[in-house]
Image (spheres, rainbow, N blue to C red):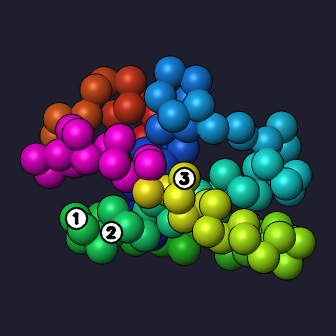
Amino acid sequence: MDGTYHELGHATGSAKRLNRQFGKRFGDDAYAFEEIVASLCQATLCAEYGPPNELHDSHASYIHHWMKILRGDKTAILHAAAKAEQAVKWLRQFDPALGSTLPDELKEAA
C-alpha cells in the first residue's frame, strides 16, 4: 500500500496530538507496537476512503516484530486497535476527502 495513510497514523502520535510513545529503533517493542497502530489506522482509512492510487507492499519486514509483541501480550492487538481508532477519529475531523483539508504539517509528515 501507499504509505500515506500509514504515515498519517504515525503523525497523530506526536506530543501535540495523541501523544503516543514511539520506539527508539526498528525492532524494539515500542516501535513495533506503534507500527501495529499505524497499520491498523491505515487499514481503517483504506476501508473508509478507498486505497490510495499507488500501491506497494513494504510492511512484510515489520511482521516479525509485530509477532513478538502479539505473542507476548494477548491484549496488545486490542490496545493497538484502540490507539488506531483514536488516530482515525483525530484525522476524521479534517475529513471532506481526508487529504485536501489536512494541516500542512500533516501533509508534510505523510
Depth check, mark 1 against mark 3: the one in front is 3
| Extreme residue in the left direction | 96
The amino acid on which the numbered mark 2 sits, given as a three-letter code, is Cys
Which is more toward the observer, 62 or 84? 84
Sequence-first tag of 3 and 2: 2
Disc 2 packing (10 Å; few <14; some 14–19; many ≥20) = some
Position of 57 with respect to 22 (left or right) is: left
Q: Which residue corresponds to the image point at 54% horizontal and 52% vertical from the top-left?
A: 83
The amino acid on which the numbered mark 3 sits, given as a three-letter code, is Lys
Q: Which residue corresponds to the image point at 72% horizontal and 40% vertical from the top-left?
A: 22
Q: Which residue corresponds to the image point at 67% horizontal and 51% vertical from the top-left?
A: 34
Residue 62, percent across and down? 73, 67
Residue 15, percent across and down? 58, 24
Dot 2 corresponds to which residue?
46
Distance from label 1 to label 2 (Cα)? 5 Å
Q: Looking at the image, do the residues carrying marks 1 and 2 touch, with CB atoms under 8 Å apart? A: yes
Dot 3 corresponds to which residue?
83
Query: Residue 80 occupies which quadrant of the picture?
Result: bottom right
Distance from label 1 to label 3 (Cα)? 19 Å
Q: Looking at the image, do the residues carrying marks 1 and 3 touch, with CB atoms under 8 Å apart? A: no
Query: Residue 54 occupies which quadrant of the picture?
Result: bottom left
In the rendered image, residue 13 lying in the magenta stretch gets the answer no
The amino acid on which the numbered mark 1 sits, given as a three-letter code, is Tyr
Dot 1 corresponds to which residue?
49
Give the magenta range: 86-98
Give the structural element (helix, strand or loop) at label 1: helix
Position of 81 with respect to 101 (left or right) is: right
Give the structural element (helix, strand or loop) at label 3: helix
